[in-house]
Image: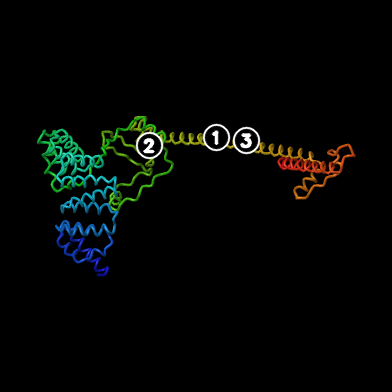
Amino acid sequence: MDKYEYRAKTEQMLAYAEQKSYQKAMSIADTIDWRKVKNTAMLSTVSEIYENAGELGKARDTLFIAYDKAPSSRKVVYRLGIISLKLGHFDEAADCYEEFVKLAPKDPNQYILRYKILKAQKAPVKEQIEALEDFKHSEYVEKWAYELARLYAEAGMTSECLDECDDLILWFSEGTYVYQAMELKMKYKPLTPLQQEKYDHRNDGIGRKDSSKRKPSFRKSKERPAPNPRIADKVRKDVHVTDSIDLPDLPEPMARTHASEPEAESQPKTRIRSTSDISTTISGASLSDALKAGVAVASGAVAPESASDDSQMTGKMKIEEILANWEATQRENAKILEKSQEEAEKEKALREKKKEEEEEVLGATKPILSDDIRKLMEQLENGEEPEITDEDAEDFVDDEEDEATESTAKARQMMEQHITRSMNNILKSYRAAQ
């Protein structure tokens, strides 16, 4: 089968599946070798077709092929666990549950899979309740909320059953499971007047979209509060529109309607009509002026006649405030710049002072060393043996000239060692001074 034939067959198969003609879709699926298909989503869809057609074995085999292609797909593992339960392979379903928890430890569907396994094994009701309570803490779905209420009733936990029914009715308001929860509640306690009214009119909305497939909306509707006169007055003072507002061109039907009206005055006016008891007409040269005038009149701060004058005064005051703020900002920036320059000059003076001190120390060190010492230091640095003069040797020769030649040689040797050590010390001191 080439790719074009495969594409044509799969499109026809999916069309039959969408029409819920699962037998026709299965007949096409049987003609395709799904072991050569790498798309796990397509394999999962094929397993659903086989499942809805009643061929659970083929659905399980198709899921095993998908698992071989993508062993880390939690959707494949979950569906494989469900199919194994329907086939009665409880051990295989338990293995799928453990694998699903490893792949997705935070997925709340693990609690549903555990509940289905416990229900299929006819485990105690309390264990089933625990699984659904864990799911409720992660996600609230009306189908499993009603199932939890039913288990409460089966376990004799009437109070918990009634609370769960009230929560379900409160969050979802209508739908198949909501009406079932109402019927379950009526076995133990009458409905409230509002709940009874909803239950009595449950068949009035036949044809509407069933809300059982929707999730609860936790957002509460907010009523728009009445405008605060103080806030309106603040908006009137602070908001200033400098540019005109260009209205878009009218559509053709509306253009013909307005063309039939008499021409307006030379001074264009924007009128705001109110549907409330206030019948005051607000006018202005532009939309922005009319809006500011309307806010002023609605807040009761000014009379309608003086609204336009106040808007002009507000514009002038706003410009003066902007100029004053700009001047204050410039002064602050000048202070900051001046302070930065002073700090830079201080730092530069400190660096120059430190440099002068170093030069003074170096200059004071140089005269200490005589020419002879400098010469000896240069000889030591070059690796030459220093020359010892007779004047240097006189300090270490005994005054008695009658001593033996051996004593004189020994003294000279000691003197040379002493001078060498002294020169080394002087050289180290000179290097440290530099």
Judging depth in this view, the residue of 246 and 400 nearest the camera is: 400
What is the three-letter code of the residue carrying label 3? Glu
- Residue 274 screen position, x and y as percent: 28, 37
First in sequence: mark 2 vs mark 1: 2
Q: Which mark is residue 342?
A: 3
The answer to whether marks 3 and 2 mark residues whose Cβ atoms lie closer than 8 Å is no
Mark 2–mark 1 CB contact (< 8 Å): no
Task: Tell me the amino acid under the disc marked 1.
Answer: Glu
Residue 47 in which image quadrant: bottom left
Q: Secondary structure at mark 3?
A: helix
Q: Nearer the viewer, mark 2 or mark 1?
A: 1
Q: Residue 193 in the image: state x and y as whole percent.
A: 13, 33
Residue denoted by label 2 = 292
Residue 269: assigned label: none
View extreme (left): residue: 187
Nearer the camera: disc 3 or disc 2: 3
**Nearest the eye: 6 or 317:** 6
The residue that mark 1 highlights is 332
How packed mark 1 is, by other alpha carbons closer than 10 Å (few <14, some 14-19, many 20 or more), is few
User: Which picture quadrant has residue 235?
Assistant: top left
Which quadrant: the C terminus? top right
- 179 or 322: nearer the eye? 179
